[in-house]
Image (spheres, helix red, strand yellow):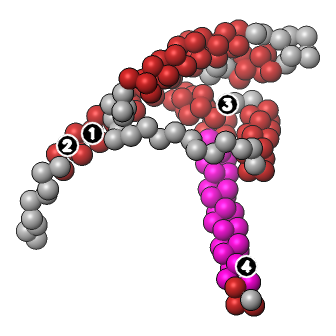
Amino acid sequence: MLTAAPPAAAPDAQKLAALSSAADVFIGFLFALGLGASGMLKPSKVVGFLSVLGGTWDPSLMFVMGGALLVVLPTFQWALRRTKAPLCSTCYELPTKKSLDANLILGSLVFGVGWGIGGICPGPALVALASLQPQVALFVAAMLLGMRLDHTVEAVACMVNNNMKAAQKQVS
C-alpha cells in the first residue's frame, strides 16, 4: 500500500529516538560495569552491607553510593540550569509529587523484603542474568511477575474507584 511521505519533522524524531536508544544502551553498559566493579553483583557483598547489627558489616557499598551521588548531583543540577532539555528528549521529566503516600511506603517495604529474601537487588539481578544462574533467572521472573501483578491490582483498584464515584453521582 502506498502511503504519503512522512512530515518533515519525522527524521528528527527518528534521529532523537535512535540517539535515545544508543544512550540507553551506553548508560546501561556503564551501570552494569559499575555494579560489577563495586561488587554489587555478589549477594554476599550486599548482605554484608545490610548486616549493620550482625557484626560483619561491610561499609564499602556506602562509598559506591556516595561516589555516585558526588558525581550525579552536581552534574544534574548544572544540566538543569544550563540546558532547556536533555540531549535525547524534548524536555526534562521531573517528579512533581512531593508527598509520601501509602503506595510509596508499601512499595519501599515490598522492595526491601524482596531484596532481603532473595538476597539480590533488582538492578544487579538484571545484569546478573548474563551469568545464566538459575536462581537469578528465577528471581527476575518472580520480580517481573510481581510487577505485572502490581499493575493488574492497580488497574482493578482504579476501576473500582471509578465505579464507586459513578455510583455516588447516580445516587446524588
Mark 3 or mark 4: which comes first in sequence?
3
Tell me the residue that label 1 is attached to: 16
- Say which of 88 and 171 sits in front: 171
In the displayed orientation, state which residue is furthest to the bottom.
171
Picture mark count: 4
**Residue located beneath label 3 in the image:** 121
Q: Earlier in the sequence, mark 4 or mark 2?
A: 2
Task: Tell me which amino acid carries mark 3.
Answer: Cys
- Depth check: 58 or 154 in front? 154
Looking at the rendered structure, the secondary structure element under dot 1 is: helix
Q: Are marks 2 and 1 in contact (CB under 8 Å)?
A: yes
Q: Distance between the residues labelled 4 and 2?
A: 45 Å
Asked if the stretch drawn in magenta spans residue 94, the answer is no
Point out the stretch of residues depicted in magenta: 140-168
Task: Please say if the residues under marks 3 and 2 sit with CB atoms less than 8 Å apart.
Answer: no
For the N terminus, the quadrant is bottom left
CB contact under 8 Å: marks 3 and 4: no
For disc 4, the neighbor class at 10 Å (few under 14, some 14 to 19, many from 20) is few
Q: Nearer the viewer, residue 126 or 75?
A: 75
The type of residue carrying mark 4 is Met
Residue of label 2 = 12
The residue tagged 4 is: 164
Q: What element carries label 2?
A: helix
Badge 3 element: loop
Say which quarter of the image contains residue 56. top right
Q: Are marks 1 and 4 in contact (CB under 8 Å)?
A: no
**x and y percent of residue 84 in the render?**
36, 33
Does 120 sit above or below residue 63? below
Residue at horizontal 22%, vertical 39%? 15
Residue at 67% over, 9% down: 63
